[in-house]
Image (tube, rainbow, N blue to C red):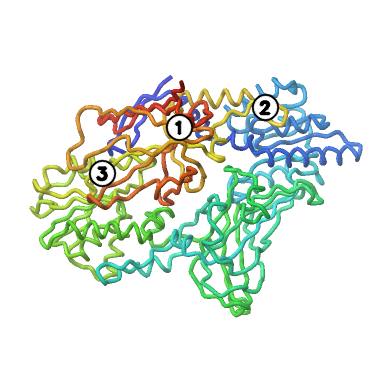
Amino acid sequence: MKTFCGKANPTTGALDWVEESEEYDYHQEIARSCYADMLHDHDRNKKYYQGIRAAVARVKARGEKVIILDIGTGTGLLSMMAVTVGADFCYAVEVFKPMAEAAKCIVEKNGFSDKIKIINKHSTDVTVGPDGDMQVKANILITELFDTELIGEGALPSYEHAHQNLVQEGCEAVPHRATVYAQLVESDLLWSWAQLQPVEVEGASLVPPLAVGRCAGAHSVCDIQLSRVSPDCFTPLGPLCTMFSVDFSKPVSSAFQSHSSQFVAQSSGRAQVVLSWWDLEMDPSGSIVCSMAPSWTYPEEQMAPWRDHWMQSVYFLPSESRVTAGEELSLTVCHDDYSLWYSLQSHSQQDSQDTAIPSRPCCTCQAHLVWTRPRFGELNDRQRTESYISALRSVLREDSVCLAISDGSLLPIFAQMLGARKIFSLESSKMSKNVIEQVLEANSIKEGVELLQMRPDQLSSNDLGGEQISVLMGEPYFSTSLLPWHSLFFWYCRTALAGLLRPDATILPYSATLHMVAVEFQDLWRIRAPCGTCEGFDVTPMDEMVQQSLDFRESREAEPHPLWEYPCRALTESTAVMTFDFTQCVPQQPVSSQGSLPLIRIGRCHGVALWMEYHLTDDIKVSGGLIGSISEQGDLEWSRHRKQGVYFLRSSFESSADGRAAVSYSFTFEPSLGDIKMEFSIDSQ
């Protein structure tokens, strides 16, 4: 059965009605999942296996039959481990139907169907009794319900319900315990993701609104590969603190809780950010530990296991505060059933009788709802900002009438400060319009900038007061963009506005180029690589399920990734594969480009990285991807502000750099769809 679905096209801005199979949503979810990443995580698998073996042995030593409840079983891997080490029976619960069906196939393929029952339900719907899903309550509880924040996938409510209804009192649990750690730091880099910084323009300072500076910010956690943030980018102000632990073998509460850790500041500085991660102790003695600590905490960084399903967390304090070395401080973490938040108190504040329990952060200024954290970082990137100011300075005149097209951009304010006569700015939402209005008010800019909340195709000469546009400008940045080329929406806007532009109008940027480089990923390849056998168990039915979903559509498309978090090496030179001329309207016919890039370095080619560069003037460009030159070894440095496109090859290729192999490419820009179709292959002689 098929159905018509309305989808907003991020490139054209149109609402496209497309016919989709009823299975499209779950195919997309499977294709973009990281099941393979978890199964490739040998450290995680090994620690779970050891913990399960020890728990089964403890129950058997008491003379009891071993009954397992495995919540969030996924492929059934942990249940198969349990049966292998002596469990008598396993109830494996999986709420996602396609995954539950794959688990049944995997369990059957490995010969465990008589000892493992797959239950396709949410664990809170599971029943116990003669006619229930489980005949008896379990005496070992195995779960993998965790996310980067530990509790964000609903682990606490699931544990709470399981202890009340599904497991015996005094049961064993694997993992046995989780512990959350945190460290207070000062970091200009990380703080730039949370607060707008002042900008110098022509000797004047553009300051952020007071409401933004006083706002506690967005509540959601910032989860990143903290291993990719060098210790040079932050200053620890205190020791690594143990914040709290959860014993999963005992009844668990999902109610609000707060925990504090007292310490003495080891450095003076600005308290801005809390870095946090957790570990799992798989047994009561704590001898089997699976740690999420970043690589720079290890004696040798290469000892750290890589995983993308569990990363580290960055929390931004509600406000920046000064601390002095030797000062007594208290770091408090609060959590509800799904999320954590932090606050800092000094010794004097702790002594106060009326110290309130910190409430969950909530954005009150709207800026943290309009600007994502990478977007804050982009707006605070001084080198990038100077590129735009320099470009504007070179094209603006005293009589310039400007129109800005980007979401929540500071470009119209820069243009006003640089002396343009009149600036109009199209805002996609009332909220982004309100945020820019706050910036204008904070800087006493009352004239010269007019914000219009409308689509480009709705704009008329009357809206512009009869003016013709002499400078059309954009970063471009649009909140709906996922892949780099989605910013070509600027081109479609420029086309829709053609009748409002002067014949000699300046377009900034005047063009964009799509770039590519073939790469070897250090670790990211794991999220797409088939598993085959995992810890001795055949999980090929899951590989087949993922590949089927990829073949449904996703394998023919690139996917967005912030490559600064995922190290890779260039195996070819980088090259511009398509150019988009914004001084002209969007063409009516498709535009194609073909070519090949020789593999010039030894390594395994996993895929292709793609990004956009914007040409502001003949000598000023801004990259949304590669920054600087590729090193002789193939090392790459990526922008932290934008995600790049990654196209994974179906099969990786071992390059010997003998000049006989190349990556062939074919790109077709289809104007009517606003999409770029691409194909890649390895040609070897």
Q: In the visual, does 556 lie left or right of 118?
A: left
Disc on the earlier residue, 3 or 2: 3
Closer-to-camera residue (658/411): 658
Image x and y of residue 362, in percent: 47, 60
Query: In the rendered image of this protein, does residue 137 appear above or below residue 200?
Result: above
Q: Residue at x 36, y 58 (%)?
A: 379
Residue assigned mark 2:
533
Residue 599's label in the rendered image is 1
What's the amino acid at mark 2?
Answer: Thr
What's the amino acid at mark 3?
Answer: Phe
- Label 2: state its secondary structure: strand
Q: Residue at x 25, y 71 (%)?
A: 444
Image x and y of residue 394, in percent: 19, 58
- Label 1: state its secondary structure: loop
Front label number (3 vs 1): 1
Image quarter of residue 240: bottom right
